[in-house]
Amino acid sequence: MPSLYRLHRAALCAAVFGIAAISTASAEEIIIGAATAQTGGLAPYDQPALAGLRMSLDELNAKGGLAGKYTVKLLIKDTRSDTAQTATVAQELIDAGAKIMITPCDADPSISAGQLTQPLGIPTLTLCGSAPVLTGAVGDVMFGTYPADNVQATAVADFAVSEGKKKVFLLTSPDSTYTANLPEYFGKVFETKGGAIVGRGTFSMGQPDFSAEITNIKGLADKPDLIMTAAYEPDFPAFIQQLRGAGVTIPVYGADAIGTPTIKALGKLVDGVVYT
């Protein structure tokens, strides 16, 4: 993840200046708390990003640390991909002396941690959470390090229009900010460029059966040129397998979270799937 690695490195170097004013001149060590998913649904995203963070911090420490003078000690606690648990471990990291907080690859748990760090002025950076509402929902200590959902959605919509697509079916889930809002951002841009939303469907994250949504798609009188969704593992593999198994060959467009080895390993089932 070289691009993510560079973003984290630059963001962390910037964050250290935010705490320099409250650090003593003799301070030599800064504790960075990483409230990240080592288990659960976010682990396939948090763990590679965390590995990039470790690499960056090792290199920075070898060169004298953040800002050339602060050696970093990284404390990591497992959020278990749960929003409430993220808040719990974030508080534990604060109690352990964390002066910078790293949060998961998702807005909802990142906001729960940020609500604890904001009153304390602790700079807080999400590994790769991408909701544009993230910083506004917390305050001036919260920083994104990754292209926002509305930016990604605009890129996908621009591509769809360039491919001559005119009609879209949006598949969303209310269970996360990412899965709820990113397809809607796409829809707004797509409509402003002359496209039309001809149908919508919803799913619950973790549900194994997408037959109702697929029946809805197959029954549309106005057939879509594409399906747009921000579903990811394990939902996207289940959806695409059942969709193609039902004989629906409509192109599917997604976002960054489906660029995983697991999904690529589906082979012909995901040939032609577009994602940021």
Image (spheres, helix red, strand yellow):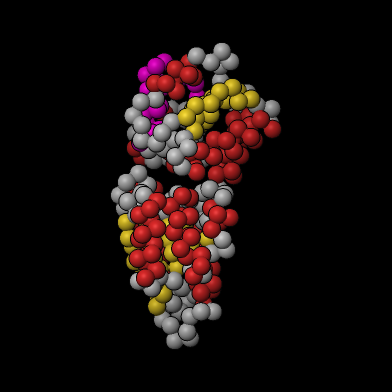
Q: Toward which corner of the image does residue 209 lie, by quadrant?
A: top left
Q: Position of residue 205 (x, y in %)?
A: 39, 36
Which residue is pictured at 46% across the width and 42% down the height? 176
User: Vertically, is 45 above or below 241?
Assistant: below
Q: In terms of image quadrants, where is residue 208?
A: top left
Tell me, yes or no, whether the highlighted magenta stretch contains residue 45: no
Q: Position of residue 79 (x, y in %)?
A: 34, 54
Whether residue 235 appears in magenta in the rendering, the answer is yes
Residue 165: tell me if it is visible: no
Q: Is residue 20 placed above or below 108 in the rendered structure?
A: below
Identify which residue is drawn at 57% across, 35% down.
184
Q: Position of residue 181 (x, y in %)?
A: 54, 39
User: Along the line of sight, which residue is nearer the eye, 17 or 23?
Assistant: 23
Region of the chain picked out in magenta, as a range: 234-251
Query: Please, which residue is most extreme toward the bottom here?
Result: 26
The foreground one among 23 and 119 is 119
**Side (left or right) of 122 relative to 48:** right
Measured as percent of width and height from the top left, residue 275 is found at 49, 36
Main SS class of the magenta portion in the image: helix
Horizontal arrangement in the rendering, residue 133 relative to residue 269 (left or right): right
Q: Measuring 51% from the left and 74% from the top, which residue is drawn there?
A: 19
Residue at (36, 35) in percent of width and height: 206
Q: Is 231 rendered above or below residue 80?
A: above
Q: How many marks?
A: 0
